[in-house]
Image (cartoon, rainbow, N blue to C red):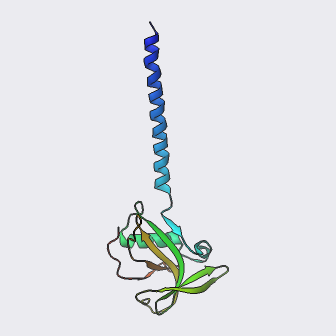
Amino acid sequence: MNPPRISVRRPLKIVLVAVIALAVVAGVAFAWYATAPRWTGSGDWAACSRLATVGPEQAVRIVTNTLRVDLLQNHAVVTPGYVNETGWGFTVTCGDHAVVGDPIASWSMPPADHAEHLGWSVIIEGDWTLCATPAFVDWTTGAELMWTANPGPAC
């Protein structure tokens, strides 16, 4: 009799289709997670990145390499900024050229060369926590100019 044999094959086909569908969904989810951007821009970052030699993603890589931070578990926030020779930070907006705006904060120490710099403020964040003190990367040279404090162990 064929009916019992057919009834066994049909559930196996359904299970096989379900397993394949779950594997495809899991593969797509992993690919999305692995390729998702690991930084977000803040302020006028998109316009300023057109003026900068070192882009925001490069600034994030410079800071994370220094801190040895894994961006699969953390992410960064990148904001364009201006730091004067005394260590005060200001907002920056960009069009044809960078325009310095309002003061944001004072870094704990001035740049080592006591010069003015346009650059990227990079903050590494974990799940709802600050992992490392913000760093400032010059957007012309890629030099890490300063930290708000000594960069300690990150996430």
Is the residue 144 above or below the residue 3 in the image?
Answer: below
Q: Quadrant location of the C terminus?
A: bottom left
Q: Quadrant location of the N terminus?
A: top left
Q: Is residue 60 left or right of residue 51?
A: left
- Asked whether the viewer can see residue 69, the reply is yes
Residue at the image position 43 percent from the left and 77 percent from the top: 134
Is the residue 44 above or below the residue 69 in the image?
Answer: below
Residue at the image position 44 percent from the left and 86 percent from the top: 107
The image position of residue 142, as x and y in percent, is: 48, 78
Residue at the image position 40 percent from the left and 66 percent from the top: 126
The residue lying furthest to the front in this view is: 128
Name which quarter of the figure residue 118 lies in.
bottom right
Residue at the image position 49 percent from the left and 40 percent from the top: 24
The image position of residue 130, as x and y in percent, is: 40, 71
Is the residue 116 above or below the residue 20 in the image?
Answer: below
The image position of residue 68, as x and y in percent, is: 36, 68
The residue lying furthest to the left in this view is: 153
The residue lying furthest to the right in this view is: 96
The image position of residue 48, as x and y in percent, is: 60, 76
- Asked whether the viewer can see residue 140, the reply is no
Q: Is residue 42 left or right of residue 70?
A: right
